[in-house]
Structure formats: structure tokens, C-alpha cells
Image (cartoon, rainbow, N blue to C red):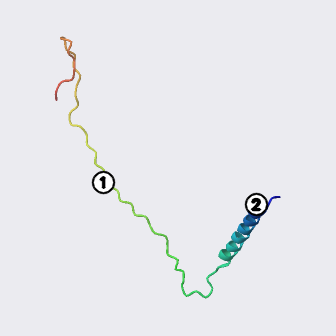
Amino acid sequence: MTTNARWIVALLVALVVGLGVALLIVAGDDDEGSDSSTVTLPPATSQTQTEPTTTTTPTETPTSTTTTDGSGGITAP
């Protein structure tokens, strides 16, 4: 094994050990001796607003007509 490879392996091992120690510290931190307190709030209720719906019905419906001049179409209401 070359000298550069040994250095790389040593740095990787040190990195893994450091991350493991950091994980243990964070996982073991239970805030003993801390003056702050945790307050649990009830879940927020969701309020949805609905708009009133209006429906309109057409008062007149177009009627189809047959014309003899070939123009066809719908008559005006």
C-alpha cells in the first residue's frame, strides 16, 4: 500500500469515527439542566370557506329550422 493510500484510509476512518461520536452526542442530548420548556399545542383546525353556488337555467332555447334556400341555421330568439 502506498503512502497516499494510507493517508486516505486514515482520513476516512477518522471521518467515520468523528461522525459516530457526533451521532452519539446528538442522540444522547436530552436537554438536562436546560431552563427552556417544551409546550405542546393542540393541532390547528383547518377552516375552509365555500362560496355559494348559483345555477341559472336558460329561459329560451334555440330551435332548429329547415330552410328551402340552403342557408340553414338557428332562428334568433
Q: In this view, does 6 lie to the left or right of 48?
A: right
Question: In this rendering, which labeled residue sits more in front, label 2 or label 1?
Answer: 2
Percent x, y for residue 19? 69, 69
What label sits on residue 35 in the rendered view?
none
* Relative depth, front residue between 28 and 5: 5
Q: Is residue 10 above or below residue 62?
A: below
Residue at figure coordinates x 50%, y 75% from the top left: 41
Q: Is label 1 in a helix, a strand or a loop?
A: loop
Residue at figure coordinates x 28%, y 48% from the top left: 54
Q: Which amino acid does label 1 sit on?
A: Pro
Q: In which quarter of the image is the C terminus?
A: top left
Q: Name the residue under label 2.
A: 4
Q: Mark 1 points at which residue?
A: 52
Q: Quadrant of the N terminus?
A: bottom right
Q: Is residue 39 above or below residue 68?
A: below
Q: Is residue 67 left or right of residue 22?
A: left
Residue at figure coordinates x 49%, y 70% from the top left: 43
Of callouts 2 and 1, the N-terminal one: 2
Q: Quadrant of residue 6?
A: bottom right
Q: Quadrant of residue 29?
A: bottom right
Q: Is label 2 in a helix, a strand or a loop?
A: helix
Please tell me how crowded label 1 is: few (under 14), some (14-19), or many (20+) other residues with Cα within 10 Å. few
